[in-house]
Amino acid sequence: MSGLVNAESYLFIDGYGETEQQAAIDAKQQLALRIYSKVDVKEMNTQSKVNNNISTSYELQSKITTLPIEIQYMDINRTTCEHSTCQYQFKIDKNKWFAFLKRDVAEYHNIVSDYLSVAGQQWRDLKRLEIIKSDLLKSEQSLIILSSLGASDLALLEDKQSRLLRRATQYENQFQISFRSSSDRFSSEVKTLLSASKVASSTGNITVYIKANMQKGKQGNHFVAKQTVLLQIFEANNLGVVVAQKQLSEMARSPNSIDSALKKARQKIIKTLKTHSIYSLLD
């Protein structure tokens, strides 16, 4: 387990590994855990019956999430080796690293503020919204690092972070997207899924038209199906012009039937739709 020592202007962190690179990774991981960690625990109970005998099993799964940390101004302070594993102590110049993080936060704030000052209700503005949210997440992570390690003079940066988050949320709530689809079954299914988004509305600033198409055939002993979904984007002020479009395509094979292969291909597309935000999906 790596250790961390706070000595005025420097942080000293320990890492273990066969090489300096491995030890540096270990030290950074341990520092990330100390700064911020979130533990998600999932319990699973399963029962099975064999020859009228019922057995029960219990499993506890845990997942630890940390912040992505880019450490600047980190140098080796000393090395101690025993056998194949070495203990490396790294020294971080806190003043320089903190100054770097503060400049980083201020730069993200300026970019977001500039975006929000000229934000409209068109397609290009919706694409910018994803950038805004990403930049605010990065600045929030840097502020967590600074606060956790005892950096001073954060009040103004934290206040601006809160104000920009509120402005971004208000701006996002103004956006409305209406979803339309062709009459085929899968297009309607995709429309229902996308319409669950909080930006969905019966009348929106932007309209997304959904059209599905499939191809099927056989290769050797397998049935093959390809499912395609085309998302066309229109703006409310000019519904006759496609301003952008996104195509999702998946292919699947099955030894049983075309329907089975088609189902697999569609499940892949559904998974993509569920694991992407509406902004990144339409990018």
Image: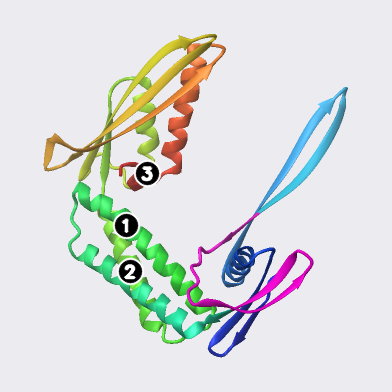
Which of discs 1 and 3 lies nearer the camera? The answer is: 1
Would you place residue 271 above or below residue 164 in this image? above
The span from disc 1 to disc 3 (Cα, nearest Å) is: 18 Å
Question: Considering the numbered disc 1 on the image, is that residue within a helix, a strand or a loop?
Answer: helix
Residue 148 sits inside the magenta stretch: no
The span from disc 1 to disc 2 (Cα, nearest Å) is: 10 Å
Residue at left offset 26%, top offset 39%:
178
Q: Which residue is mark 1?
A: 131
Residue at left offset 36%, top offset 25%:
228
Tag 2 or tag 1, which sits nearer the N-term?
A: 2
Identify which amino acid the numbered label 3 is placed on.
Ser
Q: Residue furthest bottom?
A: 8
Residue 65 sits inside the magenta stretch: yes
Would you place residue 52 above or below residue 233 in this image? above
Q: Which residue is mark 2?
A: 108
Which of discs 3 and 2 lies nearer the camera? The answer is: 2
Q: Which mark is residue 281?
A: none
The span from disc 3 to disc 2 (Cα, nearest Å) is: 27 Å
Tag 3 or tag 1, which sits nearer the N-term?
A: 1
Residue at left offset 37%, top offset 78%:
157
Image-based side of 211 in relation to 80, left or right: left
Q: Which residue is mark 3?
A: 197
Question: Considering the numbered disc 3 on the image, is that residue within a helix, a strand or a loop?
Answer: loop
Identify which amino acid the numbered label 1 is placed on.
Ile
Residue at left offset 40%, top offset 69%:
139
Tag 2 or tag 3, which sits nearer the N-term?
A: 2
Mark 1, residues whose alpha carbon is within 10 Å: few (<14), some, or many (≥20)? some
Q: Work out whether residue 16 can be spotted.
A: yes
Of the pair 119 and 54, the residue shown nearer to us: 119
Provide the residue span drawn in magenta: 63-90
Are the residues at dot 1 and dot 3 in contact (C-beta closer than 8 Å)?
A: no
